[in-house]
Amino acid sequence: MLRGPIAEISLSALLNNLKTIKSIVRDRHIIPVVKADAYGHGSIEISRLLLKHGVEYLAVAFTGEARILRESGINCQIIVLFDRDACECIELNLIPVIHSIEAAHEFSREARKRNAQINVHVKIDTGMGRLGLTGEHIMDGLLTISKMPGIKVTGIISHFSEADLKDRTFALQQLNKFISIRDMLSSNLNRYIFSYIANSAAVMSFPEAYLDAVRPGIMLYGYSPLSYDIPADDQKFYDKLIPVMSVKTKILNLRNVPAGTPISYGRTFTTKRKSKIGVIPLGYADGFNRLFSNNAEVLVRGRRVPVVGRVCMDMTMIDVTEIKDIKEEDEVVIIGSQGQEKITAYELAERANTITYEILTSLGSRARRIYV
Ligand SMILES: *Cc1c(COP(=O)(O)O)cnc(C)c1O
């Protein structure tokens, strides 16, 4: 039998989340973000299901991720958010997001070399401080790029830095800047420019930002990105999201030890009573953060039990003294439900002082995945 964690990916939960997003944004395009192997959920399977249900575009970070999709037969429009490999973009028929005039020159040169004409989207930095045209010369830059042979600017894109906050002042400034650039560009070029800026946080809380399309990632996978408690009357969307990933493993070994037994590296935990310790084949190499040492719970037989001692590379110890009839090979839930109990990526993120995104990408990408 294969060891190590299993990530159970629920396609019905994914579909539920897609429908929830559709009910919020209505006729806007939904561009699911499937970068980082669909946040650890498996980009091929996730993309296939989404495409079966009306999605027309996907977004990835790098051309390598798009290649994996193309090679598995996915031929929808794929937007490449961060790469600048013009050859790959042309060969794979991708829509690159261009971040600078220099990069635009490269795309133009490559396209002319092949006698090709490629559609590109241009990134505008409205306040994220990461990538995109910025400063006072954004319009000049856009017009310069628009005139380059071999490429056609069909869209503009920007990204919010804090649409997850309750105070939307800065997000609104970003949106207004973006809209004014779009309006200037489309009047200059005398044509419609596809524009999009909304991530999950904006989908959940900022309808003015929907524009032509939204680009949700984390919401699709069943988690709210908002960093504040949602007011009761806004709970309707939030409640409808269902986590797509459960992570499970099985007890590898059980041992009965006397009081005073140190557990794991550094002896950070010593049993205070006669104890039963379970060893599970899951460690930080599987994305179970070392910060969970003495600082997380897992589910066994429908009950919460604590992680004891340091998380190792491939192993973690849990205290199962209180669980009657426990046996080796019993299922252990890291994320997901068992009986009445539930552990979410929110809980783990809080314990490791990080965000659900990092929990899902680390645990999900290293587990063996099964689709249910
Ligand atoms: C990752 C990413 C998204 C999706 O963000 P979520 O918070 O997961 O919805 C959207 N746009 C860009 C540019 C991104 O990098």
Image (tube, helix red, strand yellow):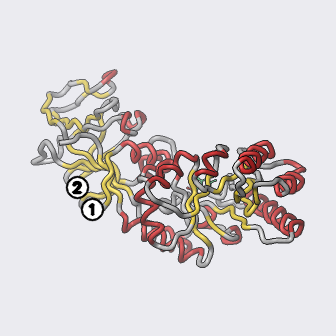
Determine whether, in the image, residue 129 is placed left or right of residue 363. Answer: right
Residue at 81% in and 46% down: 101
The image quadrant of residue 231 is bottom right
3D distance between C-alphas at marks 1 and 2: 7 Å
Instruction: Report the quarter where the N terminus lies.
Output: top left
Element type at marker 1? loop
Determine whether, in the image, residue 227 is placed left or right of residue 313. Answer: right
Q: Is residue 120 visible?
A: no
Given residues 252 and 125, the one toward you in this image is 125
Asked if the residue at tag 2 contacts the one at tag 1, i.e. Cβ–Cβ closer than 8 Å, the answer is: yes
Count of labels in the image: 2
The image quadrant of residue 182 is bottom right
Instruction: Report the quarter where the C terminus lies.
Output: bottom left
Mark 1 closeness class: few <14, some 14–19, many ≥20 residues within 10 Å: few
Residue at 46% in and 73% down: 53
Determine whether, in the image, residue 174 is placed left or right of residue 323. Answer: right
Query: Mark 1 = which residue?
Result: 340
The three-letter code of the residue at mark 1 reads: Gln
Determine whether, in the image, residue 337 is placed left or right of residue 188. Answer: left
Query: Mark 2 = which residue?
Result: 302
Direction left: furthest residue = 325
Point out the tag, 1 or 2, that comes first from the N-terminus: 2
Direction top: furthest residue = 266
Residue 48 image position (x, y, % from top left): 43, 63
Element type at marker 2? loop
